[in-house]
Image (tube, helix red, strand yellow):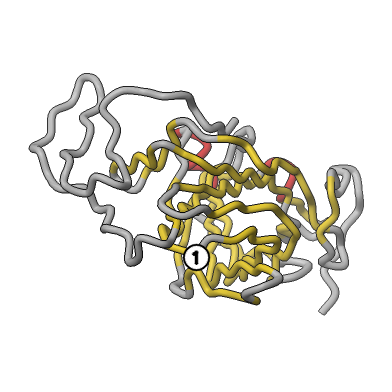
């Protein structure tokens, strides 16, 4: 499961962009600058948004390719802020198999308590073991929910989107795929270090502020502690 680990050794600190990248045990790389840039303002806090999949793998499916078109957050005082508007595609099963948390966006934000997050999903493609590619239908392309994301001056915060693919993907009687997202969302603040290596992200230290699993129903509404039962008969309406 995704987690906010305790203090570790040899991290790349978000406040120290000149430090060399940490080398995993058993491998060697040449020292190079971190990809993390300095804060744009000393009054802002840094936030990393990451994606992972802690679900079990599938027998007949090799990839679930999820495209995120936009990520936005909101606070009562500032309204909606676009974090990322560049389409990025993630293989949920590859994330699960490698136990990776992959970076969606690293951004500096004004101190505040952000209370809403919205993900806009572009498409979801399924690749099976025989190489066939199928598009999965979503009840809604918007994943919108309330949360608690604390951003403090000169501090690091993080958000983890953990898509539980084995509870998310369904098949109709005709063999078509339906992607009704079930995801666990965690936020943390006062993170001592955001460690990034080859786009893999780890949080060192920090305090949990929000932790909730939610699922989308057949009408596209996100509900706490919900998932469509695997025995439910689903059909796609044109």
Assign the N terminus to one quadrant of the image.
top right
For the view shown, which residue lies furthest in the top direction?
Answer: 26
Q: Quadrant of residue 195?
A: top left
> Viewer-proximal residue, 232 or 40?
40
The percent coordinates of residue 181 (x first, y second) are 72, 54
Q: Confirm whether residue 165 shows in the render.
A: no
Circle count:
1
For the view shown, which residue lies furthest in the left direction?
Answer: 30
Which residue is painted at 46% across and 52% down in the image? 48
Assign the C terminus to one quadrant of the image.
bottom right
The percent coordinates of residue 211 (x first, y second) are 70, 41
Which residue is painted at 80% across and 57% down in the image? 216
Q: Confirm whether residue 174 shows in the render.
A: yes
> Viewer-proximal residue, 224 or 179?
224
Disc 1 residue crowd, few under 14, some 14–19, many 20+, Cα 10 Å: some
Which residue is painted at 45% across and 56% down in the image? 45
The percent coordinates of residue 77 (x first, y second) are 66, 73
Relative side of 42 to 230, left or right: left
Q: State the residue position of label 1.
A: 110
Q: Quadrant of residue 167?
A: top right
Above or below — where is 5 with respect to 148? above
Relative side of 81 to 204, left or right: right
The percent coordinates of residue 54 (x first, y second) are 60, 35
For the view shown, which residue lies furthest in the bottom direction?
Answer: 238
Which residue is painted at 72% across and 65% down in the image? 144
Above or below — where is 23 with respect to 63? above
- Helix, strand or loop at label 1? It is loop
């Amino acid at each position: 499961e995704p987690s906010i680990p305790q203090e570790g050794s040899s991290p790349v600190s978000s406040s120290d962009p000149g430090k060399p990248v940490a080398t995993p045990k058993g491998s060697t790389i040449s020292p190079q600058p971190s990809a993390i840039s300095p804060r744009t303002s000393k009054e802002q806090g840094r936030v990393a948004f990451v994606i992972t999949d802690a679900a079990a793998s599938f027998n007949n499916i090799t990839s679930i390719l999820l495209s995120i078109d936009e990520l936005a957050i909101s606070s009562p005082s500032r309204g909606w802020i676009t974090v990322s508007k560049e389409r990025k595609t993630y293989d949920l099963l590859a994330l699960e198999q490698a136990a990776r948390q992959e970076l969606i966006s690293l951004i500096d934000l004004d101190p505040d308590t952000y209370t809403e997050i919205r993900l806009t999903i572009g498409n979801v493609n399924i690749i099976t073991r025989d190489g066939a590619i199928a598009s999965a239908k979503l009840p809604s392309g918007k994943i919108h929910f309330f949360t608690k994301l604390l951003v403090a001056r000169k501090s690091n915060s993080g958000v983890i989107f953990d898509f539980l693919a084995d509870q998310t993907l369904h098949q109709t009687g005709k063999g078509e795929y339906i992607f009704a997202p079930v995801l666990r969302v965690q936020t943390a603040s006062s993170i001592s270090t955001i460690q990034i290596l080859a786009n893999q992200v780890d949080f060192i230290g920090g305090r949990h502020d929000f932790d909730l699993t939610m699922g989308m129903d057949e009408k596209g509404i996100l509900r706490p502690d919900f998932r469509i039962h695997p025995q439910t008969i689903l059909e796609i309406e044109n």
